[in-house]
Amino acid sequence: MRFLAVMAILLGLAACSPVQRIAKANNAIRLEARNLSKHGEATGDRVVIDSANRIDELAAGVSVDLSQVEDKTPAWMTMLQWWGIALAAVALLVILWQSGALTGLRILVGWLPRKKVAQAELAVDMLDPSRPEGDREYVAAMRAQDPEFDAAFRKAQKRRKA
């Protein structure tokens, strides 16, 4: 959850540039100045009307000047963005790997591990009646190739004997 919160903050900071924030604030100032001017007209207060018009003119000048300003992203923010992209890519790969989607892709492409190919060939040989390999040879080869399978096999044998 913390990771997602940090990513949301970084994306929020990256999504709205300083120039955009200034432009939005400037538009809000101009809107408030117009509302203030309307209020001054309704009450007949000339000082309020003149001040509101002056604020609107100054904000209009800011709009003109803002068109010549360019955004400059700090180097640390760019680095954080790239780190965020890299972390998101790694997280996506881990999720895809753990879900089995990458295994399906490997099978589709035909990229099979050597151990699995050797096990499959031994299984085919075991099932072929013209070959001398049998069940015991298959199990022995599986135990020799895969230490995890060997440990699980010994544990299952121990449970059966007990």
Image (cartoon, rainbow, N blue to C red):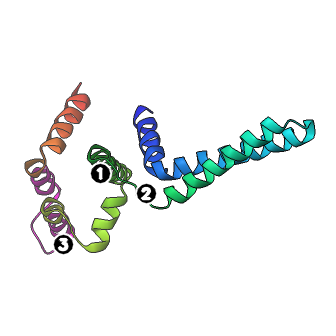
72 up-or-down from 38: above or below: below
- Say which mark, if any, is on residue 93: none
At label 1, which amino acid type do we have? Answer: Trp
Say which of 103 and 19 sits in front: 19
Say which of 9 and 137 sits in front: 9
Check disc 2 and report the residue beneath it.
Answer: 69
Nearer the viewer's eye, disc 2 or disc 1? 2
Asked which quadrant contains residue 64, the reply is bottom right
Residue count near mark 1 (Cα–Cα under 10 Å), binned few <14, some 14–19, many ≥20: few
Residue count near mark 3 (Cα–Cα under 10 Å), binned few <14, some 14–19, many ≥20: few
Q: Residue shown at 35%/53% (left/top)?
A: 72
Locate residue 92, reporting x and y percent. Answer: 36, 52
Nearer the viewer's eye, disc 1 or disc 3? 1
Mark 1 secondary-structure assignment: helix
Locate residue 7, reporting x and y percent. Answer: 42, 42
Of callouts 2 and 1, the N-terminal one: 2
At label 3, which amino acid type do we have? Answer: Pro
Locate residue 162, reporting x and y percent. Answer: 24, 24
Q: Quadrant of the N terminus?
A: top left
Q: Where does the magenta region start and end?
A: 120-142
Question: How many angstroms separate mark 2 from mark 3 (CA)?
Answer: 81 Å
Asked which quadrant contains residue 138, the reply is bottom left
At label 2, which amino acid type do we have? Answer: Val
- Say which mark, if any, is on residue 129: 3
Check disc 1 and report the residue beneath it.
Answer: 82
In this picture, residue 90 sits left or right of residue 147? right
In the picture as drawn, the residue positioned furthest to the top comes out as 162
Locate residue 136, reporting x and y percent. Answer: 13, 53
Q: Residue shown at 13%/48% (left/top)?
A: 146
Magenta stretch containing residue 129, yes or no? Answer: yes
Mark 3 secondary-structure assignment: loop
Say which of 33 and 58 sits in front: 58
